[in-house]
Image (cartoon, helix red, strand yellow):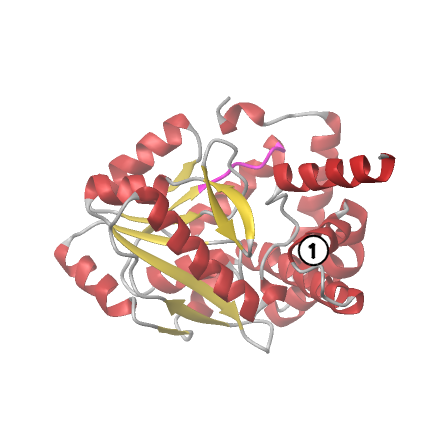
Amino acid sequence: MAVEDKQTRTWADWLTDRLGRAVIGALLGLPHRWRVAVMGWLGRRVLGPLSGYRRRARENLAYVWPEMDRTERARIADAVLDNVGRVLIENYATAEQIARAKTWHTHGPGLSPAEAALAEGRPILFVSGHFGNYQAARAAMNVRGFSLGGLYRPMNNAYFNEHYVRTIQAVGGPAFARGRRGLASFMRHVKEGGHGALLIDQYYGDGVVVDFLGKPAPTAQSVGDIALKYNALVVPIYARRLDNGLDFDVLLEAPVPHTDPETMTQALMDSLGAQVRERPGQWFWVHRRWKPERQKARAERIAARDA
């Protein structure tokens, strides 16, 4: 089933969307520093607990790092929820995000190759995960002459998705919904020398199983497929939140060599994994990243208990 077909328009969806619009609208009336801090607090203290995201973040942390102290897992989970809240409102405050992006330190061994590819008209795939603020990375590159078209997963709530997509488009560059039609359009964009932004850290049942943070993780290998087909430069990119909670250090790592799709996918997951280990509170531990493995582990625990 295409991703677009999974969207719903129920009364609950409508109500959630209206509440979300009201909160976002109210916060956008505040100075940027306040709105980001308030939304971080709401994510940590209200939305995270009510949505079950706090519990899921703690469960994922325990699955990956079972030896970690429970207090430390709770601290990281709170940091994750704070960051998720900040990301949400930052991405709706597009004008402020773009203005601040002009001052962010954008650097790393991948910057010069990306600039060379831009000058040559060579396709570029900028690859990241739900880490820091992934859209801030697009903003940082687009204000520097690039035009990153985003391949995104539509939200299940179709009402909310309508304005969520506008936040992606407002940063600059086209937006493509993940799915058969959207992927075809995205590939045409890359083929013509365009710049693409992809996030590859969510569960993908039909993907290749690679290692992520020490656990088997089904992952889409479309980055390698597209890069090899169109000779696109592949650059891991991360917008890492600074201590002031408002700005970012934008790192472009060395381009991933062209080998085969699975090897390239593993290299990208290794890159992201290193960033997560260094700054665990900035990755979205709220996703169901290891669903089959967790179900298997649960079944094994139950079997052992009942034996």
Instruction: Tell me which amino acid carries mark 1.
Output: Ala
Question: Residue 245 location, x and y as percent?
Answer: 60, 72
| Dominant secondary structure (helix, strand or loop) of the stretch shown in magenta | loop
Q: Which residues are magenta?
A: 152-157
Residue toward you, 131 or 270: 270
Question: Residue 152 location, x and y as percent?
Answer: 46, 41
Per the image, label 1 sits on a secondary structure element best described as: helix
Q: Residue at x 38, y 27 (%)?
A: 181
In the image, farthest residue toward the front: 307
Q: Residue at x 28, y 44 (%)?
A: 260
Query: Going by the image, does 183 lie left or right of 89?
Result: left
Q: Is residue 276 above or below residue 222?
A: below
Q: Is residue 232 visible?
A: yes
Question: Residue 288 location, x and y as percent?
Answer: 63, 43
Label 1 packing within 10 angstroms: few (<14), some (14-19), many (20+)? few
* Residue 156 within the segment the image draws in magenta: yes
Query: Going by the image, does 293 lie left or right of 274?
Result: right
Query: Going by the image, does 48 lie left or right of 102?
Result: right
Residue toward you, 226 or 107: 226
* Residue 69 within the segment the image draws in magenta: no
Which quadrant does the C terminus fall into? top right
Residue toward you, 10 or 56: 56
In the image, farthest residue toward the right: 306
Question: Residue 160 location, x and y as percent?
Answer: 61, 38
Q: Residue at x 69, y 59 (%)?
A: 81
Q: Residue at x 39, y 71 (%)?
A: 102
Q: Is residue 247 above or below residue 231?
A: below
**Total numbered circles:** 1
Q: Is residue 17 visible?
A: no
User: On the image, which quarter does residue 278 sit in?
Assistant: bottom right
Q: Which residue is mark 1?
A: 26
Q: Is residue 255 above or below residue 290?
A: below
